């Protein structure tokens, strides 16, 4: 019997203490240092964490930018989160697994997990992308048990390759087209596209 994945979480009440919000917050410095402190983190079985509203799972969510285009894909049936299947996304990311724990000293577990997801999903190997914003969406069941940390990376060309079945039709589209109509996107992507100018401005200053 395969060993169940254990994912990195923090207690929901901690977010409430700091100041819960709905949607996207640019105040990443207010949340990330507290929520990723070793004393606040724990690993839980993913099947339990997906259903337990007392906890939030931390998810790096990386936007991939090439000139004036942004990477978009559709979530396929092979993705781990069935509640997102069929929706468009502009964020590459995944859970931080306990297998990354040995790398977590000095926050390297979080960084290595994000890098691993980029390699597995679209074949991009990059250094740490800066954290730009936080996402919290309590309006859906899947959103209530997850907390997103928005990053962005710039790549020199559009040569991305799908590495996993959960990524369908990855393509770079003009950012102007992406923000024009966000119908059909998962909520986290809609939040990012609604604040894309601010995120890119912050990326340029980082």
Image (cartoon, grey):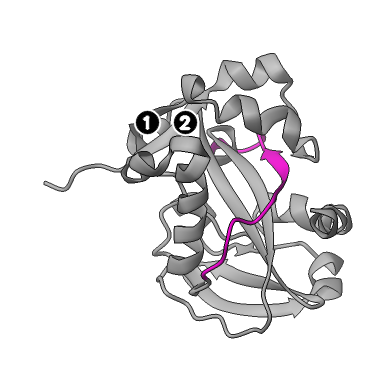
* Rendered residue at 58%/85% (across/down): 159
Q: Quadrant of residue 133?
A: top right
Cα distance between the residues tagged 1 and 2 = 6 Å
Q: Quadrant of residue 65?
A: bottom right
| Image-based side of 142 in relation to 193, left or right | left
Label 1 belongs to which residue?
Answer: 43
Between 35 and 106, the one lying in front of the other is: 106
**In the rendered structure, which segment of residues is drawn in magenta?**
125-141
Residue 54 seen by the camera: no
Q: Which residue is mark 2?
A: 9
Q: Helix, strand or loop at disc 1?
A: strand
Q: Where does the image place residue 191, in percent across and percent down from the top left? A: 76, 50
Q: Are marks 1 and 2 in contact (CB under 8 Å)?
A: yes
Q: Residue at x 47, y 77 (%)?
A: 162
Q: Does the magenta-highlighted stretch encompass residue 139?
A: yes
Indicate whether 139 appears above or below 65: above
Is residue 192 part of the magenta span, yes or no? no
Evaluate whether residue 42 shows in this view: yes
Rendered view: 112 above or below 102: below
Where disc 2 sits, the SS reads strand
Dot 1: within a 10 Å radius of its alpha carbon, few (fewer than 14), some, or many (20 or more) residues?
A: some
Image-based side of 120 in relation to 29, left or right: left
Where is residue 81? Give x, y as percent. 45, 51
At 65% from the left edge and 71% from the top edge, which residue is drawn?
Answer: 72
On screen, residue 38 above or below 125: above
Q: Nearer the viewer, residue 3 or 28?
A: 28
**Any mark on residue 169, and which?**
none
Locate residue 152: give its quadrant: bottom right
């Amino acid at each position: 019997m395969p060993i169940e994945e254990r994912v990195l979480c923090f207690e929901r009440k901690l977010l409430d203490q700091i100041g819960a919000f709905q949607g996207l917050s640019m105040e990443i410095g207010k949340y990330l240092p507290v929520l990723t402190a070793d004393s606040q983190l724990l690993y839980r079985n993913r099947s339990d964490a997906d259903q337990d509203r007392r906890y939030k799972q931390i998810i790096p969510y990386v936007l991939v930018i090439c000139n004036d285009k942004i990477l978009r894909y559709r979530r396929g049936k092979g993705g781990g989160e069935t509640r997102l299947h069929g929706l468009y996304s502009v964020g590459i990311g995944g859970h931080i697994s306990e297998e990354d724990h040995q790398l977590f000293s000095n926050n390297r577990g979080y960084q290595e997990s994000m890098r691993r997801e980029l390699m597995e999903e679209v074949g991009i190997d990059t250094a740490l992308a800066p954290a730009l914003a936080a996402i919290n969406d309590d309006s859906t069941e899947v959103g209530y048990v997850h907390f997103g940390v928005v990053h962005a990376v710039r790549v020199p060309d559009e040569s991305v390759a799908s590495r996993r079945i959960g990524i369908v039709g990855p393509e770079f589209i003009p950012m102007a087209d992406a923000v024009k109509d966000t119908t059909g996107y998962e909520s986290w992507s809609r939040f990012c596209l609604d604040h894309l100018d601010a995120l890119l401005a912050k990326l340029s200053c980082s």
